[in-house]
Image (cartoon, grey):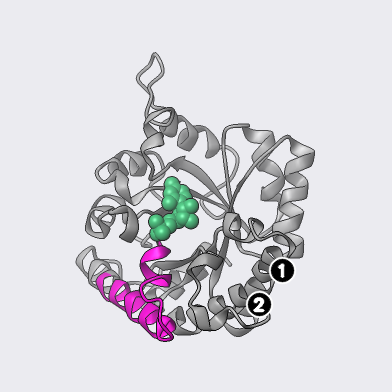
């Protein structure tokens, strides 16, 4: 999916919501546990209920890999289900990969050739040759960790070098030499508030994947005020706040309603910050 196609979906749905499929077997409603593949059944129900209100899904690999072979199969089946039923959805494998070149090549093959997601989250720490192998796939995306939502962002990302440049700023600046805004996005946590202004000084055109609203307390209004650009430029993720809003048999309906609430807020933000035209 291209940047333009993603923006068109955002305008069509008046939403830049990404639903996080952080499916924890321990949180799945009891009545699904008797089915052959509870994780997949849960995901299908969540996807069917939320798809009118979102433009992206983000399965986080930790939740699948922790269940071994069955978890990986549920991940693959979930991606295939979205691909087949809702081909306009943007699918992000939140895997936070990155290694020496030949190993990164294998990660890229896994996610782009085998599972066929649109994007993979990648850690920038090992540098250019660890990221490049993900960039040889046309219309597939690398989402590079830049300024994360957790407290630990202070440990490295917000530290300054002797010229006063913070590490996340260096990641944004240098990595722009590796790929354009047609293939690279950045993770910036919703909890980072006004720092979105500093991010936008360096990457005005790029899409940002923004986790941290809902359970982590980030403000959607602040993210939009400081982070939105003329083609929206934001995919805001919520995982627990949507998928675990209800643990009864009505879980999917409630998840849909939570997604709808966020979509309504996002529609207001798109209007408020003047994002309304199809760009060419
Ligand atoms: O900086 C980051 C990077 C990734 N995440 C991931 O996003 C979701 C957030 O889940 P919530 O339940 O909505 O808090 C989860 O998969 C994280 O691993 C992040 O939170 N912050």
Neighbours of disc 2 within 10 Å: few (<14), some (14-19), many (20+): some
Q: Pointer 1 and pointer 2: residues touching (CB < 8 Å)?
A: yes
Q: Residue furthest top?
A: 162
**Which of the 4 image quarters holds residue 266?**
bottom left
Q: Which residue is depicted at the point 40% across and 64% down?
A: 240
Q: Is residue 12 above or below residue 97?
A: below
**Which of the 4 image quarters holds residue 63?**
bottom right
Circle 1 is placed at which residue position?
A: 73
Residue 260 image point, x, y percent: 33, 79
Residue 204 image point, x, y percent: 38, 47
Magenta stretch in the rendered image: 237-265
C-alpha gap between disc 1 and disc 2: 9 Å
Q: Nearer the viewer, residue 180 or 31?
A: 31
Check residue 262 for magenta coloring: yes
Q: Is residue 280 visible from the viewing direction of this image?
A: no
Q: Is residue 221 visible from the viewing direction of this image?
A: yes
Q: Which residue is depicted at the point 68% across and 37% down?
A: 130
Circle 2 is placed at which residue position?
A: 37
Q: Nearer the viewer, residue 69 or 232?
A: 69
* Image quarter hosting the C terminus: bottom left
Neighbours of disc 1 within 10 Å: few (<14), some (14-19), many (20+): some
Q: Provide the secondary structure element on which disc 2 rests.
A: loop
**Which of the 4 image quarters holds residue 81?**
bottom right
């Amino acid at each position: 999916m291209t940047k333009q196609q993603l923006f068109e979906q955002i305008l069509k749905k008046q939403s830049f919501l990404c639903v996080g499929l952080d499916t924890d077997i321990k949180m799945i409603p009891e009545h699904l546990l008797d089915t052959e593949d509870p994780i997949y059944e849960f995901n299908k129900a969540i996807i069917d209920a939320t798809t009118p209100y979102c433009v992206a899904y983000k399965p986080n690999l930790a939740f699948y890999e922790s269940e071994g072979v069955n978890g990986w199969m549920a991940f693959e089946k979930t991606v295939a289900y979205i691909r087949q039923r809702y081909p306009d959805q943007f699918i992000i494998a939140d895997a936070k990969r990155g290694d020496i070149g030949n190993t990164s090549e294998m990660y890229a093959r896994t996610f782009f050739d085998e599972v066929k997601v649109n994007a993979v989250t990648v850690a920038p720490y090992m540098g250019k040759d660890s990221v490049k192998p993900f960039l040889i796939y046309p219309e597939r995306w690398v989402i590079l960790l830049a300024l994360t939502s957790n407290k630990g962002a202070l440990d490295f990302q917000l530290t300054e070098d002797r010229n006063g440049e913070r590490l996340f700023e260096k990641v944004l600046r240098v990595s722009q030499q590796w790929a354009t805004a047609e293939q690279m996005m950045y993770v910036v946590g919703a909890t980072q508030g006004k720092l979105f202004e500093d991010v936008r000084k360096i990457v005005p055109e790029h899409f940002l994947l923004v986790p941290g609203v809902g359970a982590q307390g980030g403000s959607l209004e602040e993210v939009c005020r400081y982070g939105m650009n003329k083609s929206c430029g934001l995919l805001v993720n919520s995982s627990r706040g949507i998928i675990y809003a209800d643990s009864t048999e009505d879980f999917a309906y409630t998840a849909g309603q939570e997604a709808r609430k966020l979509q309504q807020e996002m529609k207001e933000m798109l209007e408020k910050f003047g994002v309304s035209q199809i760009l060419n």
